[in-house]
Structure formats: C-alpha cells, structure tokens
Amino acid sequence: MELAIEKPQSVIRLYDENTGTWRFIKADKESAKSMEIVEKTLRSLGLSKNEVRVYLYLARAGEKKASEISEVLSLHRTETYRILRDLEKKGLVSSVFEKPLKFIATPFEKALDVLIKAKKIRIRLLEKRKERLVGLWLSLPKFETEPERKEVFQVLEGEEQINLKAEEILSKVQREFLSFLSECDISSFYHSGFLDKLENASKKNIKIKLLTDYSPKSCFFLEKLKLKKTEYSVSPGVEKLPTFMLADGEQLLLLIRKDNGKKRVAALWTNYKAFIAAMKTLFQNLWESSLFEKSKLHIKTNL
C-alpha cells in the first residue's frame, strides 16, 4: 500500500501561543496559488527569496521575535537578523521597542508602494546615467574586425523579457510580420498592449498577419481587438503548437511552455535562416488551410 505524503508547500505550520504547541494545516489550493503570485511579484520588485518568506510571515502572523521567525522558517538565527535588518532598511519591517525585541511588518499595500517607488527611482537614475555610459563605451578603443553576419540564438526567461523582445522585433520590422498566437498566450499579449501595436504597425504599410487557434478564448480576444488593417485568421487542430513570430523572414521568436501550455517559461530568439524558413513554411501552410475555416466564423470585428 502506498502512503500519501503531502508536499511541504501544501502544509502551513502555525504556533499556538496559548497551548505552546505547533499546528499543521493543509493549505487551500486557491490560497497557495494566490500566495505564489504575491511571492513572484515581491521577487520581481527586488526582494530575495528569504526576504520574501520573512516579510510575508510577519505580515500574516503579526509581531514576532527573531527566534520565532527563525524557528518557523527554518532559518539560521544570524541570517534571520540580517534579513530583518535589510528589510528594515528598505522600509518593510519595523522594530518594536520592548524586551525581548520584536519585529512588525509594514502593511502589504504600503510595502508595495515602497518597493515600486524604489524601483522607479533606480530606473530614473539609470536613465540619467545612460547617455554618459554610452559615451564611455564609444570612447573605448575598438578592435578592427570585418563585419560578418552570424547566425545566433538567444534564450529569454520571464514574461517581461519576452514581451520586450516581441516589441523590439515589431518596432524594427520593415515589410512583413507573421505571428501565430496560441490560446495560452493571446490574452497576455492583449493585456500588454502588444496586439494594439500590431494594428498600429499595419497602418504603416507593413504586412501584418495574425493567426491563432480556433477556440472560444482566441475568438473572444479577436473580437475585442476590432482589427481594421491587420489580417487575421484562425486554424483548428493546432492546440499544442507554440506561439511564434517572424519578422521580415530574418528574425524568429519562439515561445516555450511546459505543464501542457499552462506556464510560459522561456522564449528562443534567432536569426538562423534555415529555422526561420521552416517556420515560415509552417505559417503559410496553416494560413492557407485556415482561410476556408475563417469563412465559417462569426467574429464581430471591423475587418
């Protein structure tokens, strides 16, 4: 007989001060998912993994001694004190002046404001330094090399980096931009504003073709877009095909997902001609086979 063992992430450990005992409570799946989103957001705003753990524990449990935090989170006490001091410097934790010394978390909404403002300040400082840094770089002695086109690959991780790369490719396109957006990705590209940029590019005499799978979700976003200039179509039977974009037959951005397409993990960018030619042939075949299906659709757009 197999024993059912809960994953550590699905169990919450709570200390009952009245009885002096620990309680183990199974975490609700929705709560765990919400907590995962919160943790990822705090990490993206510059906190380390253990800083996030300490802050969130304090924010939920209330004021605690360093020894209590150390025990609950299984951290060395010296490291716990260091993390608490770092969080205090960032305005996310305060010390309570009593013996023994306790710590209390800044309210979550205010903590987010503090982190966002700090990130904006860092960005403004970098923008001010950009011109000087570029000048310093250009002043450095250069190696004399003959210009040669290299076929290269670049792996990108994170939704933000992938969206930035997609926008960069689109901004440099001169003739033709072909994109297949899977059901998993069309919503994120819609909310990021990328699909609006596609429509704007099509108004500059750039040939834009948007292809997606035939699903209620994809059709919903096509209807919301109200495309006028961008050519669009849907193709049935391509649910497992990953999102990809082709610019002028010279650049390819291919998104890579795992967990049956539920989680975007990375993207591959390349200017490798043979790979690009193969993906362009695939796109053209899908486009031609989708035209018949398009006539059956009732998508309310302005096209």
Image (tube, rainbow, N blue to C red):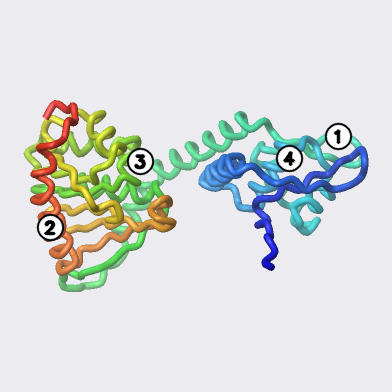
Provide the residue designation for mark 1.
97
Mark 2 touching mark 4, by CB under 8 A? no
Left or right side of 36 for 211: left
Q: Residues within 10 Å of mark 4 (few under 14, many from 20)?
A: many
Where does residue 247 sit, x and y in percent of width and height?
16, 52
Residue 187 image position (x, y, % from top left): 33, 39
In space, the residues marked 3 and 1 are separated at their CA atoms by 46 Å
Which residue is tagged 3?
Answer: 188
Proximity of marks 1 and 2: CB atoms separated by less than 8 Å: no
Q: Which mark is residue 249?
A: 2
Three-letter code for the amino acid on which mark 2 is drawn: Gly
Q: Determine the residue positioned at 66% across, 36% down.
A: 91
Circle nearer the N terminus (2, 3)? 3
Instruction: Quarter of the image for the N terminus: give it.
Output: bottom right
How far apart are the two marked residues, 2 and 3, measured between alpha carbons? 25 Å
Q: Left of 298 or right of it: where is 125?
A: right
**Of 299 and 228, the residue lying toward us:** 299
- The residue lying at 67 percent from left, 44 percent from top is 27
